[in-house]
Image (spheres, rainbow, N blue to C red):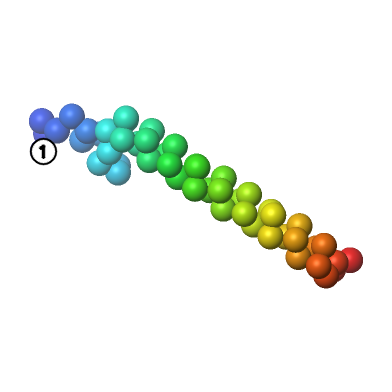
């Protein structure tokens, strides 16, 4: 284990793997945010709550 090149990482990922995971995670988060924003706008147009 001492010879492991990523032994300093808490997740066990290499730097490149962590960057790829972050890119995919942020893409999914942005898609979720955009979908929820559109859903709120559509519901607001259907039945305003103010």
Q: Name above or below for residue 41 compared with residue 47.
A: above
Q: How crowded is mark 1: few (under 14 residues within 10 Å), some or many (20 or more)?
A: few
In this picture, residue 43 sits left or right of residue 13: right
> What is the x, y in percent for residue 32?
56, 53
Image point (76%, 65%), residue name: 43
Image point (38%, 40%), residue name: 21
Most distant residue in the right direction? 50
> What is the x, y in percent for residue 17?
31, 35
Image point (75%, 61%), residue name: 42
Report the residue marked by disc 1: 1
Image point (14%, 33%), residue name: 4
Quarter of the image that includes the C terminus: bottom right
Q: Name above or below for residue 11 compared with residue 17.
A: below
Q: Nearer the viewer, residue 45 or 29?
A: 45
> What is the x, y in percent for residue 37?
69, 54
In this picture, residue 43 sits left or right of residue 16: right
Q: Nearer the viewer, residue 10 or 39?
A: 39
In this picture, residue 39 sits left or right of residue 31: right
């Amino acid at each position: 284990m001492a010879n492991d090149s990523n032994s300093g990482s808490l997740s066990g990922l290499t730097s490149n793997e962590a960057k790829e995971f972050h890119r995919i995670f942020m893409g999914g988060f942005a898609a979720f945010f955009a979908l929820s924003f559109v859903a709120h706008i559509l519901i607001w147009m259907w039945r305003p709550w103010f």
